[in-house]
Image: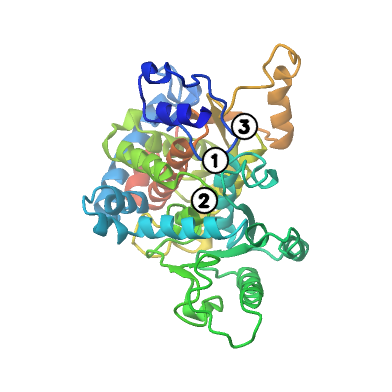
């Protein structure tokens, strides 16, 4: 009865449908397969009042940076390729033919995730640092906080997920192998799968992927030289690996192989199969995630500069960098390196993913960015702190109950101890809630803002618009 009530609410049925014999107050399982579709409220960017207030000393410079950002936006939209979120959703959601939808890249990702989800109870995801950080962020924010600790029925039939790769972690690798040893005697609960997500260019990633792939092959077919056929389709997936990287299958029929578009590497791979496949395996609504990213892209294209969250986010980095730069600096415009302060420890993956953003971006096709020396000059390590504020949690706030009145005032202090900063917040990113749509908006906004910051700082013609040095003002 509870699941029927949830299904009716998901379809937005009127209350009369629940009146005759159905339970109106249904209790949800922590990771139930039936979840009501959340709303699609926008993510907002809120710069500090000392930067944008009409009476603030920096107000004129703020308007100048926004005007320069508008020029960057036009150039970026004119020269950039179609972003992954728009491209995937256009092929998957707008085609009326079922056959054409089945040929789309997103359908292939969802189909591969379904096969693996139904075949195994644990998935080991091997990826480089940026892709691994994005995957861990999605798992920590969009799944149950203790997803791996729940039994399979409370996980909604989704497998446990373990991430490896990027850096040598011998103890974690051996501990993971210990968990892969059959224990229960149940074929499904003892089965495990492997996903190699991304290019896998780091030596530690290649070695880990090769070791686990060979172990999986020996487990499925212990007889050497046996024909694998399609036996590994539900247990092995290779996303975007190249033939010379040592982690590709021995034959074309071994496992599931998914391609990556050009430029989908590092932090820009967050909306590609490298991150969407592991997320979908864990039960995350990746279509809703892409819809959030597409919504932020539309706001970037259409919103005026004063209400555009991407331009506002980039302008703060330019203003703080401009104020922290000394008068004798060689560059006319400098972007401050952003440091994100999340609300709790679940967002650790966001911090690690964001540190990789200065690498070449998939937003543009202008080739690799300049050398590290120029990047060091274009970004300075000054005190730019960005807070993440969440208006509504996924579940009712337990710590704010009447039985624990003394806990709430200490929440901010505890967060400050986890992520200490010696500076005041320059801006705040406000999320309506923690779900796939909001996370998609957040990641897309940070990707675009990093590209705008780079172009503002690297293009002399645009940087000149914000190069007017006034009296030193402490931000």
Q: Report the residue that reaches farthest toward the front.
A: 21
Q: How many marks?
A: 3
Q: Position of residue 359 (x, y in %)?
A: 49, 58
> Which label lies toward us, 1 or 3?
1
* Picture colour scheme: rainbow
Could you tell me which secondary element the residue under label 2 belongs to?
helix
Could you tell me which secondary element the residue under label 3 belongs to?
loop
Answer few, some or many: residues within 10 Å of disc 2's Cα (few below 14, many 20 plus, some between 14 and 19).
many
**Residue 474 visible, this orientation:** no
Q: Report the residue that reaches farthest toward the left.
A: 96
Q: Is residue 364 left or right of residue 128?
A: left
> Which label lies toward us, 3 or 2?
2
Q: Position of residue 469 (x, y in %)?
A: 44, 36
Label 2 and label 1: CA atoms lie apart by: 9 Å
Residue 343: which numbered mark, if any? Answer: 3
- Which residue has dot 1 on it? 142
Disc 2 vs disc 1: Cβ atoms closer than 8 Å? Answer: yes
Label 3 and label 2: CA atoms lie apart by: 22 Å
- Which residue has dot 2 on it? 279
Q: Earlier in the sequence, mark 2 or mark 1?
A: 1
Q: Nearer the viewer, residue 296 or 426?
A: 296
Q: Nearer the viewer, residue 380 or 4?
A: 4
Using the image, determine if residue 153 lies above or below residue 260.
above
Label 1 and label 3: CA atoms lie apart by: 15 Å
Answer few, some or many: residues within 10 Å of disc 1's Cα (few below 14, many 20 plus, some between 14 and 19).
many
Q: Position of residue 382 (x, y in %)?
A: 59, 41
Using the image, determine if residue 425 lies above or below residue 56.
below
Q: Position of residue 371 (x, y in %)?
A: 49, 64
Q: Is residue 214 left or right of residue 196?
A: right
Q: What residue is at 49 percent from the left and 55 percent from the top? A: 275
Name the image quarter holding residue 140: top right
């Amino acid at each position: 009865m509870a699941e029927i009530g949830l299904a009716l609410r998901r379809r937005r049925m009127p209350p009369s449908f629940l009146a005759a014999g159905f339970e109106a107050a249904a209790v949800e399982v922590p990771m139930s397969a039936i979840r009501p579709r959340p709303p699609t409220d926008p993510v907002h960017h809120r710069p500090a009042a000392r930067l944008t207030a009409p009476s603030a000393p920096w107000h004129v410079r703020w308007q100048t940076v926004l005007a320069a950002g508008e020029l960057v936006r036009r150039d970026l939209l004119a020269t950039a390729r179609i972003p992954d979120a728009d491209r995937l959703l256009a092929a998957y959601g707008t085609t009326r033919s079922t056959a054409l939808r089945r040929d789309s890249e997103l359908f292939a990702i969802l189909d591969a995730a379904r096969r693996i989800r139904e075949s195994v109870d644990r998935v080991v995801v091997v990826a480089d640092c940026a892709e691994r950080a994005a995957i861990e962020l999605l798992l920590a924010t969009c799944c149950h906080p203790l997803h791996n600790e729940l039994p399979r029925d409370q996980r909604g039939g989704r497998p446990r997920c373990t991430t490896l790769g990027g850096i040598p972690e011998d103890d974690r690798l051996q501990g993971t192998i210990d968990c892969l040893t059959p224990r229960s005697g149940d074929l499904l609960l003892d089965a495990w799968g492997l996903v190699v997500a991304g290019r896998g260019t780091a030596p530690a990633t290649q070695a880990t992927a090769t070791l686990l792939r060979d172990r999986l092959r020996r487990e499925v077919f212990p007889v050497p030289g046996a024909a694998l056929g399609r036996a590994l389709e539900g247990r092995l997936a290779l996303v975007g690996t190249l033939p010379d990287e040592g982690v590709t299958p021995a034959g074309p029929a071994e496992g599931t192989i998914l391609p990556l578009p050009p430029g989908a590497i590092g932090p820009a791979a967050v909306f590609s199969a490298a991150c969407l496949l592991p997320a979908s395996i864990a039960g995350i609504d990746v279509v809703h995630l892409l819809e959030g990213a597409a919504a932020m892209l539309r706001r970037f294209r259409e919103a005026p500069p004063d209400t555009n969250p991407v331009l506002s986010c980039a302008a703060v980095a330019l203003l703080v960098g401009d104020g922290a730069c000394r008068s004798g600096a060689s560059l006319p415009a400098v972007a401050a390196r952003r440091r994100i302060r999340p609300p709790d420890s679940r967002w650790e993956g966001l911090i690690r993913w964001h540190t990789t953003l200065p690498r070449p971006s998939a937003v543009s096709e202008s080739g690799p960015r300049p050398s590290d020396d120029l990047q060091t000059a274009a970004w300075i390590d000054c005190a730019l702190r960005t807070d993440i504020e969440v208006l509504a949690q996924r579940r009712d706030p337990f710590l704010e109950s009447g039985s624990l009145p003394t806990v709430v005032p200490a929440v901010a202090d505890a967060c400050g101890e986890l992520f200490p900063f010696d500076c005041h917040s320059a801006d705040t990113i406000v999320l309506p809630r923690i779900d796939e749509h909001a996370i998609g908006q957040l990641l897309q906004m940070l990707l675009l803002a990093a590209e705008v910051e780079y172009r503002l700082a690297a293009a002399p013609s645009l940087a000149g618009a914000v190069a007017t040095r006034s009296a030193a003002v402490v931000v």
